[in-house]
Image (cartoon, rainbow, N blue to C red):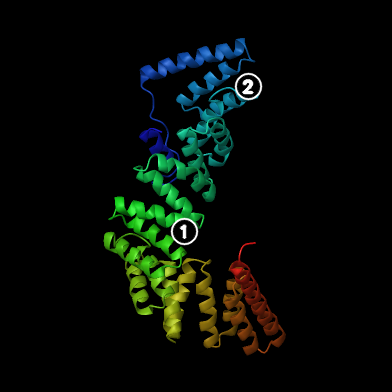
């Protein structure tokens, strides 16, 4: 696959922070004149012999060169209906879908093209990138891994593979690929962040913190880098260090909702309820989907005996994720304080049920394979 084509593919997937598919370079006036003449001749050939699959496929090719992808796809589909075994038809169809950013639609024809020619690096790479664009990350990793092995120096393609592994929660694969990328780009903040996420997914949080610290050193102005470091420090119960990291994030973005929420959580853990309330209310004004902010807000409001407000916050936390027991437990405690024992018993029963489910899952995972 040529570098220019691969760059276009990566941009189309958003890997290089593009805002969507990038069109092919516009043809020169001379090239456009030739394309117009070729299109005219191909359309004439189709009219003269509507059952000629090759003529329709050739029309699709020239329409694609002109950037007329919807018309090209129509021509390819008609050619395919006439002759499914026509060489290259599914690959060209898939490319036309891909160039429009129709990643899900590109998968089937590209998969068929790869089946017809398993050695096609172009079909395999585009199929992997289409799966990535369609958010089918496990499939993307499966197709991209052989493509990367064939072109190990291609750092951008390796990034897509590594991100696919990470998003598919295949952390061992992600760590292996990001380690290769770190060797090639030791000063890349984004690579250190992604490497850190992979290590954290493997339960190696101290090593993940080192990667995030490297990211902060490389790009202290980068959005979310300080927050990511702070989150790992908070997770490791290094609350003073986490507080500094979250405050550093706020120095870049005073309305960073997640940093505000976790600063509120730290203040609550230190029994500084007034400070916690200020942070948590600012966080929930920014975003209504931060569960931790609503759980903690409910706890702080309950501590201040503002029961109706606490009830609303905890009920919203449950709505955001009913499978988490902590909100149900706090809701049960709140119902007790409000003199509603039946409601409290219902919430505590839910807590027991969720813990039992978690224990059952853990036991199942520990069983040896049959």
Q: Which of marks 1 and 2 is nearer the N terminus?
A: 2
> Judging from the image, what secondary structure is the residue with disc 2 in?
loop
User: Residue 171: which numbered mark, if any?
Assistant: 1
Out of 307 and 79, give the one closest to the viewer.
79
Out of 223 and 130, give the one closest to the viewer.
130
Task: Quadrant for residue 82, please give it.
Answer: top right
**Residue drawn 52% across and 50% down?**
137
Does residue 366 appear to the left or right of 32 in the view shown? right
Q: Quadrant of the N terminus?
A: top left
Q: Residue 112, percent across and down?
A: 58, 33
Task: Quadrant for residue 313, please give it.
Answer: bottom right
> Judging from the image, what secondary structure is the residue with disc 1 in?
helix
Q: Residue 284, percent across and down?
A: 49, 70
Q: Residue 368, percent across and down?
A: 61, 66
Provide the residue designation for mark 2.
83
Give the mark toward the camera: 1 or 2: 1
**Residue drawn 60% across and 18% down?**
53
**Residue drawn 46% across and 45% down?**
145
307 relative to 247, above or below? below
Q: CA gap, disc 1 to disc 2?
A: 43 Å
């Amino acid at each position: 696959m040529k570098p220019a084509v691969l760059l276009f593919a990566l941009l189309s997937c958003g890997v290089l922070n593009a805002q969507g598919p990038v069109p092919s370079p516009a043809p020169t006036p001379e090239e456009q004149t030739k394309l117009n003449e070729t299109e005219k001749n191909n359309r004439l050939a189709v009219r003269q012999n509507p059952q000629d699959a090759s003529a329709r496929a050739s029309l699709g090719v020239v329409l694609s060169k002109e950037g007329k992808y919807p018309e090209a796809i129509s021509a390819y589909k008609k050619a395919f209906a006439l002759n499914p075994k026509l060489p290259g038809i599914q690959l060209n169809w898939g490319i036309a879908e891909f160039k429009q950013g129709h990643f899900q639609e590109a998968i089937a024809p590209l998969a068929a093209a790869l089946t017809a020619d398993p050695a096609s690096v172009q079909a395999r790479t585009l199929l992997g990138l289409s799966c990535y664009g369609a958010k089918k990350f496990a499939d993307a990793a499966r197709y991209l891994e052989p493509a990367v092995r064939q072109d190990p120096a291609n750092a951008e393609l390796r990034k897509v593979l590594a991100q696919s592994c990470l998003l598919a929660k295949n952390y061992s694969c992600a760590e292996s690929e990001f380690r290769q990328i770190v060797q090639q780009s030791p000063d890349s903040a984004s690579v250190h962040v992604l490497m850190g996420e992979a290590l954290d997914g493997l339960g190696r949080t101290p090593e993940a913190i080192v990667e995030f610290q490297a990211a902060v050193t490389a790009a202290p102005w980068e959005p979310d880098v300080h927050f990511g470091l702070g989150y790992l420090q908070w997770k490791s119960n290094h609350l003073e260090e986490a507080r500094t990291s979250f405050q550093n994030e706020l120095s870049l973005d005073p309305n960073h909702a997640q940093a505000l929420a976790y600063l509120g959580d730290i203040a609550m853990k230190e029994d500084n309820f007034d400070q916690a309330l200020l942070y948590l209310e600012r966080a929930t004004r920014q975003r209504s989907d931060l569960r931790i902010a609503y759980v903690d807000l409910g706890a702080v409001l309950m501590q201040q005996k503002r029961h109706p407000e606490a009830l609303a916050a905890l009920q919203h936390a449950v709505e955001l994720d009913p499978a988490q027991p902590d909100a149900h437990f706090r809701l049960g405690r709140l119902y007790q304080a409000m003199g509603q024992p039946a409601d409290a018993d219902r919430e505590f029963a839910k807590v027991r049920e969720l813990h039992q489910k978690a224990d059952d899952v853990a036991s199942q995972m520990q069983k040896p394979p049959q």
